[in-house]
Image (cartoon, helix red, strand yellow):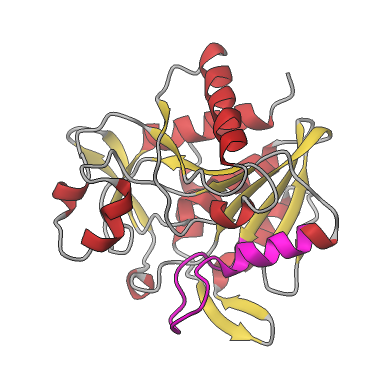
Amino acid sequence: MDDKLLLEIAKRPFDGHYRKGMRRGKGERRDFIVATLRKARLEPREDRYGNVWVESGKTGRQRLLSSHMDVDPLTIKHSKGIRVRDHPRHGKVYKGILDNAVGCYLNLKLATSNKNGRKTIHIFTTTEEPAKKKGRDSKMSADNVVKTLRMRKIKPSVCVAIDVTYPGLKVPARRLAEVWDDTEYSELFDVKDGTQTYVDGITGRSRRKATNTARQLINHYKKNGGRQSVQMRELSGWDEAQSYSKIAPSFAYGPVGYGKFDEPNQTLPKKHLATALRFLRRMTAVE
């Protein structure tokens, strides 16, 4: 794994709620992502809202991979990067603010390595988190991306929101939000869950098609030597997949981390991140 790249992303803060005109976001993370893409001889562009777009690959129907750049507003003041540590159960782990440096890392790795694979649109959105002002859409950046895709008459075959995710649930997914503030983490999530990555957030009008697409991708991955753990479940949150489902089959995907993602000191096993990268690389490969 490219520890240096992940740590460089994580130590650069980004506030997705800052706004100047239509453009959103303030912080070093966006500039670092753009510079990394250009160093790989790609041609990133920023839309009027501050989202970064770049394309990779040469063949097949386009797929869209999205990751938000902002740090949760409750943890942004604690954003001091990620450290590599030893863990008695998981071996080497990343410790720190994972959401969503991990998603940006995976998206960057895919964009910069997918020279001749499947055509892919990579988007780094300014914000995913709930706005500070009451009534603002928590998926505003993804909604703006959907508007742009419609205007350009682009319809991806599938959209994937990449982000770190939680282990197995101990409470029904539909009740998670209502019990979040008053329930201990160990009562919400199964910390002994051995699943390394999850497909989540399958919602919207194309839910059945998204479910079938995700199942096909998982089966294809496992048949082609992907023995590491990839499972599908019903868990929807604020992720961008809900917005992207308006235009194409969509779901969220990411490695399992531990700790509440609106609090500091989260933990991610390195092997989970490696599995997520292998799975996503299989998605962008041309068979």
Residue 44 point in image, percent of width and height:
76, 58
For residue 268, side relative to residue 111 (left or right) = left
Residue displayed at 32% across by 64% down: 262
As for residue 167 lying within the magenta part, the answer is no
Q: Quadrant of residue 90?
A: top left
Q: Is residue 225 visible?
A: no
Residue 173 point in image, percent of width and height:
32, 47
Q: Disc count in the image? A: 0
For residue 256, side relative to residue 107 (left or right) = left
As for residue 132 lying within the magenta part, the answer is yes
Residue displayed at 53% across by 19% down: 219
Residue displayed at 56% across by 71% down: 28
In the displayed structure, would residue 193 be above or below residue 82? above
Q: Quadrant of residue 46?
A: bottom right
In this view of the protein, which residue sits in the foreground, 2 or 204? 204
Quarter holding the C terminus is: top right
In this view of the protein, which residue sits in the foreground, 41 or 159? 159
Q: Is residue 27 visible?
A: yes
In the displayed structure, would residue 11 be above or below residue 90? below
Q: Which residues are magenta?
A: 125-149
Residue 139 point in image, percent of width and height:
54, 65
Residue 105 point in image, percent of width and height:
54, 49
Residue displayed at 68% across by 45% down: 248
In this view of the protein, which residue sits in the foreground, 287 or 114? 287
In the displayed structure, would residue 154 be above or below residue 209? below
